[in-house]
Amino acid sequence: MEIRDLNQTIAQLEENLKNLDSARIQVEEVTGSNKELSEALAEVSNNVSSLADKITESTSLAIKDMNSTILDFKQNVEKLKTLSESFTKRIEDKSTNIVNEIKNVQTVITTEIISIKQNLESLIEDQKKEIRKIQKNQKILMAILVVTLMMVIFLKFI
């Protein structure tokens, strides 16, 4: 039952109680105050009043419990919201840090690759020069060897 319905029921009970009391008074006047009827009506009146008090008390306790539960729920929702926002912020910060670290590593790797490439190109160029020197020296040695052989042959015929 809703509080409004309970309050309406209580109001009706009180109205009925007044009507009963009014009827009792009328009956007493008409019948000459029947004592048993008065006592019975008084007992009913007390019982209805006691029931109305109990309903009001129960309703009040239910409202307090419901308000407490709602307040607890609201506080828990706020805590969850705060934790969620904090967690989201931390994830965003970590993501930004990771992206920046990846960019830094990528830059270092790119720089190292360029340096290695330049070193390799320089080394290849140096090796080509050395090979050309060796080839030149081989040609000179071949020429010397040919001249020496010709001299030996010439000296043998002389």
Image: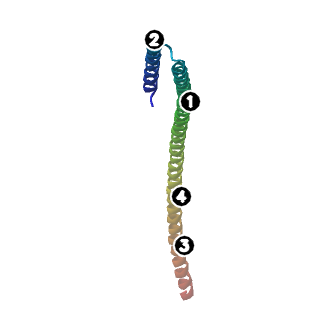
Mark with earlier residue (2, 3): 2
Please name the residue that numbered disc 3 is placed on: 141
- The answer to which quarter of the image holds residue 64 is top right
Type of amino acid under label 1: Asp
Residue 123, disc: 4
Camera-nearest label, 3 or 1: 1
Residue located 56% across and 31% down the image: 72
Mark with earlier residue (4, 3): 4
Mark with earlier residue (3, 1): 1
**Within 10 angstroms of label 1, few (less than 14), some, or many (20 or more) residues?**
few
Q: CA distance from mark 2 to mark 1?
A: 48 Å
Q: Residue furthest top?
A: 29
Protein image colouring: rainbow
* SS for dot 3: helix
Please name the residue that numbered disc 2 is placed on: 29
**Vertical side of 104 occupied by 25: above or below:** above
Q: CA distance from mark 2 to mark 3?
A: 157 Å
Please name the residue that numbered disc 1 is placed on: 65
Type of amino acid under label 3: Leu
